[in-house]
């Protein structure tokens, strides 16, 4: 790893993305913070990252907008000179039972969660190939492994990210670019705020929901410690899927 290390985290204005940005900042990474709507929150993440003595900048772009993504990645490269770590974290849910699921619900989730990762990874890989080093971490989910009633769109997007991860790992390994995925279980963020915790705990061997910090710790491990790990999907779910 070069002396100056740069990490880009998509969807880093809150939740898992925010905590991942702070974790990597605490490890000495300069941080590119992507968000789409919550500018004040993104600015706060920038401030908190800078408190670790690293450089941080916010970059507003919608991961579904190819032109905006390409301009954003160019701006990040211009600002920091390199991108060592990419965390494809931006994601949404639009749940509903399949027969009632509209094309809009399906397309919105696939476009942001899966195609968004393609859009961002494409220009970033070009940069990583020139550097001959890089680590990409895709945010999948346990439901991409085991499915979930009411989440056909979301599960398909997260399963798609697993195939994407394994294929890219095979393509890019010879360029010293590692590609892995994290599959979180139930993590306490805005996304899971409406869930019935007591019902969930019964099925989790560790008997608690995860914290965003639990995910960030594994992302940090994959980003820089796990130098002989690629193409893997790491479950971070309290033992829910074993
Ligand atoms: P969250 O709190 O809802 O945060 C989602 C982030 O994604 C926000 O920063 C949001 O930006 C950003 N975002 C949404 N659409 C975007 C777009 N089109 N372009 C750019 N950024 C966009 O979610 P979270 O719970 O932290 O989840 C983060 C990731 O982990 C997601 O991929 C999710 O599927 C995955 N995950 C979460 C759990 C869980 O239990 N929480 C479990 C498994 C997997 P703005 O704030 O600016 O709108």
Image: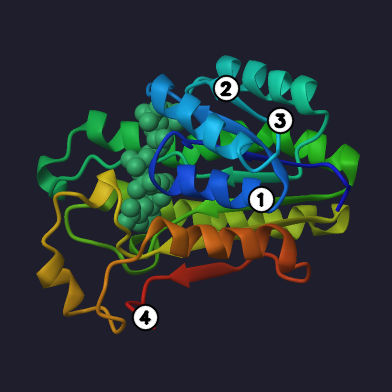
The reply, left or right, for residue 30 in relation to residue 59 is right
Q: Residue at x 46, y 71 (%)?
A: 235
The residue positioned 42% from the left and 53% from the top of the image is: 158
Q: What element carries label 1?
A: strand
Q: How far apart are marks 2 and 3 (CA)?
A: 15 Å
Give the labeled residue for mark 3. 123
Q: To which residue does mark 1 refer? A: 136
Relative placement, left or right, of 217 versus 122 is: left
From the image, state whether disc 2 or disc 4 is nearer to you.
2
Nearer the observer, 58 or 101: 58
* x and y percentages locating residue 165 in the rendered image: 60, 56
Dividing the image into four equal quarters, which quarter contains ligand 1?
top left
| Rendered view: 233 above or below 101 | below
Measured Cα–Cα span from mark 3 to mark 1 = 12 Å
Are dots 2 and 3 in contact, CB under 8 Å?
A: no
Give the label on residue 59, or none: 2
The numbered mark, 2 or 4, whose residue comes first in the sequence reads 2
Rendered residue at 70%/24% (across/down): 76
Q: Quadrant of residue 207?
A: bottom left
Give how far across and how far down residue 236 sits, in percent.
44, 69
| First reached walking from the N terminus: tag 3 or tag 1 | 3
What residue would you read off at disc 4?
Answer: 239
């Amino acid at each position: 790893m070069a002396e100056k290390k740069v990490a880009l985290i998509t969807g880093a204005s809150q939740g898992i993305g925010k905590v991942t940005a702070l974790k990597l900042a605490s490890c000495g990474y300069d941080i590119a913070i992507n968000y789409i709507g919550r500018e004040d929150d993104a600015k706060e993440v920038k401030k908190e990252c800078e408190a670790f003595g690293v450089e941080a900048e916010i970059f507003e772009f919608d991961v579904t907008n190819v032109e905006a993504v390409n301009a954003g990645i160019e701006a990040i490269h211009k600002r920091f000179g390199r991108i060592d770590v990419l965390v494809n974290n931006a994601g949404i849910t639009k749940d509903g039972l399949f027969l009632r699921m509209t094309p809009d619900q399906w397309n919105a989730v696939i476009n942001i969660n899966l195609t968004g990762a393609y859009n961002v990874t494409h220009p970033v890989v070009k940069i990583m190939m020139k550097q001959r080093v890089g680590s990409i971490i895709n945010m999948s989910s346990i439901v991409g492994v085991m499915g979930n009633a009411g989440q056909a769109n979301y599960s398909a997007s997260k399963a798609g990210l697993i195939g994407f991860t394994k294929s890219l790992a095979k393509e890019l390994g010879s360029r010293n670019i590692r590609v892995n995925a994290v599959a979180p279980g139930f993590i306490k963020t805005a996304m899971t705020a409406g869930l019935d915790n007591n019902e969930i705990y019964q099925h989790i061997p560790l008997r608690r929901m995860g914290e965003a910090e639990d995910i960030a710790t594994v992302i940090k491990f994959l980003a820089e410690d796990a130098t002989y790990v690629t193409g893997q999907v790491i479950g971070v779910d309290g033992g829910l899927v074993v």
